[in-house]
Image (spheres, helix red, strand yellow):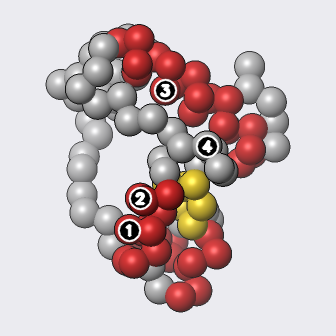
Amino acid sequence: MPGGPRGRCSGLPGQRVQPLTREMLGWADSVLAMDASLREVLRAIADDDVQPKIAVYLGDCELPDPMGKDQDAFNACAVLIEAGTALHVGQPPQ
């Protein structure tokens, strides 16, 4: 992440941040939130037809936020993200 710990989670070169819009939510095939509270924020932004596409990334298990923590916390979060990928793409993590 830019300005954050380096290693497994080091951000994307040329990454640009922009505000999330209803149009972006409508464009997406699915919208995945780190936790239930963020899912509710996304639902508040989204139009009614987008609501079914919004889910918590790990289902009932919330993804911990590693911001402000050490590299081990970022690495542990990355492992959970990689493992959770199988829930959304139908393939086991490698």
Marks 3 and 1, the one that precedes in the sequence? 1
Residue topped by disc 3: 77
- Residue bearing mark 1: 41
Separation of residues labelled 3 and 1 (CA atoms): 21 Å
- Distance from Cα at disc 4 to Cα at disc 2: 13 Å
The answer to whether residue 82 shows anywhere in this view is yes
Quote the CA–CA distance across marks 3 and 4.
Answer: 12 Å
Q: Is residue 89 above or below residue 36?
A: above
Type of the residue with mark 2: Leu
**Residue 84, position in %: x, y?**
66, 37
Cα–Cα gap, marks 2 and 3: 17 Å
Q: Residue 13: in sight, yes or no?
A: no
Which label was assigned to residue 61? 4
The type of residue carrying mark 1 is: Val
Which amino acid does the dot numbered 4 rest on?
A: Cys
Q: Secondary structure at mark 4?
A: loop
Q: Could you classify mark 4 by the number of other residues whose Cα lies within 10 Å: few (under 14), some (14-19), or many (20 or more)?
A: few
Between 72 and 48, the one nearer to me in the picture: 72
Q: Residues within 10 Å of mark 2 (few under 14, many from 20)?
A: some
Q: Residue at x 64, y 75 (%)?
A: 52
Pick whichever of labels 4 and 2 is earlier in the sequence.
Answer: 2
**Disc 2 and disc 1 in contact, CB within 8 angstroms:** yes
Q: Position of residue 31 (x, y in %)?
A: 54, 61
Q: Which residue is mark 2?
A: 38
Q: For marks 2 and 1, give the CA distance.
A: 5 Å
Q: Up-down: is 31 above or below 73?
A: below
Residue with the most extreme left position: 3
> Callout 3 environment at 10 Å: few (<14), some (14 to 19), or many (20+)?
some
In this rendering, position of residue 75 left or right of residue 88: left
